[in-house]
Image (cartoon, rainbow, N blue to C red):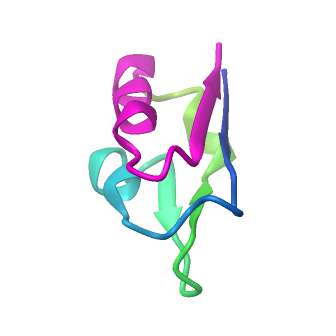
Amino acid sequence: MKVLVDGSMCVGHGLCEAAVPEVFEVTDEGFATVRQGEVANTDPDRIRSAVNSCPACALTMEE
């Protein structure tokens, strides 16, 4: 599974990090990033929910 953040769309709401903190992190600059090493060990339904909840539509997930 691959999870991506479109940095040009992310506005740093942080909902992804709140939903799945082991996968998403909001940096000091205020933009979400993906902790790649943790994606494979996380329930895909939780990740999908976070992706679908992004108000800026900045997240994508490829299974």
Q: Is residue 42 left or right of residue 62?
A: left
> Picture quarter containing residue 32?
bottom right
Which corner quadrant holds the C terminus?
A: top right
- Picture mark count: 0
Which corner quadrant holds the N terminus?
A: top right
> Picture quarter containing residue 3?
top right
**Is residue 47 inside the magenta stretch?**
yes
Q: Nearer the viewer, residue 9 or 4?
A: 9
Q: Nearer the viewer, residue 43 or 53?
A: 53
Q: Position of residue 47 (x, y in %)?
A: 43, 31
Quick check: 41 above or below 45?
below
Q: Position of residue 23 (x, y in %)?
A: 49, 46
**At 36% from the left edge and 45% from the top edge, which residue is drawn?**
20
Residue furthest to the top? 63
**At 69% from the left edge and 62% from the top edge, which residue is drawn?**
7
Q: Nearer the viewer, residue 8 or 17?
A: 8
**Is residue 42 inside the magenta stretch?**
no
**At 51% from the left edge and 44% from the top edge, which residue is drawn?**
57
Q: Position of residue 11 (x, y in %)?
A: 50, 69
Q: Position of residue 48 (x, y in %)?
A: 43, 25
Quick check: 5 above or below 44?
below
* Span highlighted in magenta in the image: 43-63
Q: Is residue 22 left or right of residue 28?
A: left
**At 61% from the left edge and 52% from the top edge, which residue is drawn?**
35
Q: Nearer the viewer, residue 62 or 6?
A: 6
